[in-house]
Amino acid sequence: MTPASRNIGRLSREFARRELATLVGTTGVRSAVLFSADGFEIASQATDSAAAARLAAIGSSLSALGSAIAAEAGLRDFERTMIESSDGTVLIMRVHGTRAMSLAAVADHGAVLGTLLWATQRCCEALGRIAGE
Amino acid sequence: MNPGVQGEFKIVFTGPMGAGKTTAIAALSEVEPVRTEVENTDRMSHDKEFTTVGLDMGRITLPGGQVVRLYGTPGQARFRFMWDILGRGAAGAIILLDATQAGVLVQLDLFVDAFAAHVPRGAIVIGLGRTHQPGALASDAFAERLEARGFTLPVLSVDVRKRRDVMLLVETLACILEAQTTEGLPS
Amino acid sequence: MDMNDVNAHEREAIQMQTLGIHDIGLPVDASRALHSMLQVLNGRLRTPWQTCHLDRADVLIAHAASDPAVLASWSRGGKPLVLVIDERAPRPTSPFVLRQPIRVMQLMTMLESVAEQLASRPSAVQPRRARNPDSTWMPLESLRQLMARHGDAGPLVATTSDGCGVWIDRGTAYAAVSTLQRLRLGELRVGAFATGPQPVPASAVAFSTFDLAWFVALKGPTELAPWLERGTAYRLRRWPDFGRLGGTSALIELAALASAHAWTPARLAEASCQPIEDVHRFLNAASMAGLVVNAPVTAQPRAAAAATSMWSRFVGDLRRHLGRVA
Ligand SMILES: Nc1nc2c(ncn2[C@@H]2O[C@H](COP(=O)(O)OP(=O)(O)OP(=O)(O)O)[C@@H](O)[C@H]2O)c(=O)[nH]1
Ligand SMILES: [Mg+2]
């Protein structure tokens, strides 16, 4: 058990995994990881668990850098960032809840950008609700 | 890596969680440093409230106009990718350690090996904190460990909350770089 | 070595006298590891080593917790003693210490310095010492002898130039906080150690005799110590802890040069642009604190390079910025 999983009860961890499964069901989405602000994986839908742990750490760095750059520019806090490559997209989005968490979704070129954004946003809202409870 | 050409170079502060990287950079930087600290959920590893997950960045401008960028890394091994990103192209590294932590000699080896790959040979200074606290391992044990592994690197007992002590670390690193240029030229 | 050079062969053969080593008090596995490391190392060291009976040994390797009677009788013979200490044990004051687990590199450096000392004992050290019959070296020599006795000496006291006491008791140094502070700042000289009437005062703080040796030598004679040689190149094996000992920019520069390369005292003075007297004191202090090894004199780096390097400009600028004036 990672220290971060203490943030979210056993039941809601199951719930989180189900929400992530729905997201991964979206066309083109390959994997999804929910992680704490300090880089621990809380729940994931991914074939490679080591890769999910690494994605959690790198995702938390990017979220923190996102917050830093927003602050530098005099903007309010980080909400999301997108890394686009020639064959896919990684979307990192903040989950609003009692604890700081973010979600990373990895999609291949089969994903439609608008759908990916919408589905991830919806997943974050659902996760925010359980984390807030 | 040539400060004469670019007029700018970087020093990396690294070391395990809670060693004082963020504190050291804040003590030395002339501007409010960029921080990427978030809530620490891993109180088993270290009982501190916040932890760096991205980088710290401070700056000092020298009278000659040169700019020294001070980067701090995260401490946990899961952020190793940031060590490599920040270590690349650094003039030197300052490894901070907490003398009271269990397994601190293993941490020494880990960080020396990780950063020796990035900085010019020998451009590493070790700053050892909390040496006056009970259970602290003396700096001699660290120097001997390095010697046994074939490294001759300074291990300096410091309190990074004091600007003067952080200066000592940076000055020592600069002297090592200077000595290397002396050594590098053919006789 | 050039295989065609017969003279080199002959010289080598004369030096190739095997040295005997004996170990006591080590855990069985550590002793076994030591023996196999010796086998591995033989042929790579300048002098061959062989394990032998205690009576024939040139060097004794002993666990720090070995029978004190054996250790005492060994040190009366004046031969080198290598103390083996446990991983987290504090470093004792004897010059040769191996920390467990013993590593090959550590053992190799240690054996080389022990061999060095054995070789230099009768010839190099004695005549030079005879040329210094005056008392200037008394404080350092008395301290050196105390340190070689690895901590069996009872309370001894020396007086500082401001009239305060510095004590040594069973291998640990003691002084008042204010005295230690002034030693650190390089403000005090220390006299020779002798048995004194007063015991160590309860208010005194303990510190390492290596630190004391460093302080004393840095304020000691400006000549090269009798146990060092003008024609030999010296290199730092470990850095002094300037955080604990206090360090001026000049000392940090010397340490940086001497850890990058082996220098004769004169070349180190040239390279650092520092007075030879200061270089002598630095080398004396570093050797007293057990931080120096002699290395073969290779091509000496060109001294003038330092002054023109971009890094020295940088160091200068940095010091001005940091407010640390050399
Ligand atoms: N008492 C004492 N406290 C110290 C000393 N050095 C550092 N500290 C404290 O230790 C803490 C170090 O925290 P940080 O500067 O956040 O450490 P960090 O290395 O950036 O940690 P991470 O970002 O979590 O990896 C601060 O609260 C310092 O005040 C010391 O020598 N003595
Ligand atoms: Mg930090």
Image (cartoon, grey):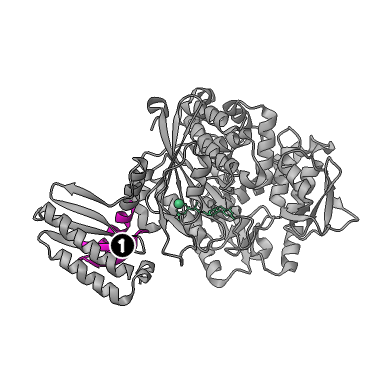
Question: Farthest bottom residue?
Answer: A11
Q: Nearer the viewer, residue C148 or B68?
A: B68
x, y percentage for residue C74? 72, 61
Whether residue B186 is visible here, answered yes or no, is: no
**Quadrant of the rendered image containing residue B77:** bottom left
Which residue lies at the image location 39% right of the left edge and 30% below the top edge?
B2
Q: Chain of mark 1?
A: A
Q: Nearer the viewer, residue C89 or B169?
A: B169
Which residue lies at the image location 71% right of the left edge and 54% below the top edge?
C207
x, y percentage for residue B30? 49, 36
x, y percentage for residue C195? 87, 54
A34 on left or right of C87? left
Q: In the rendered structure, which amino acid carries the disc numbered 1?
A: Phe
Q: Which quadrant of the rendered structure holds the N terminus of chain B?
A: top left
Q: Is residue B18 magenta?
A: no
Question: Farthest right residue?
Answer: C197
C275 on left or right of C109? right
State the extent of the magenta-drawn residues as a range.
A32-61
x, y percentage for residue B56? 42, 46
Q: Number of labelled discs? A: 1
Which residue lies at the image location 50% right of the left edge and 22% below the top edge?
C308
Whether residue A93 is visible here, answered yes or no, is: yes
Q: Which residue is mark 1?
A: A35
**Quadrant of the rendered image containing residue C214:** top right
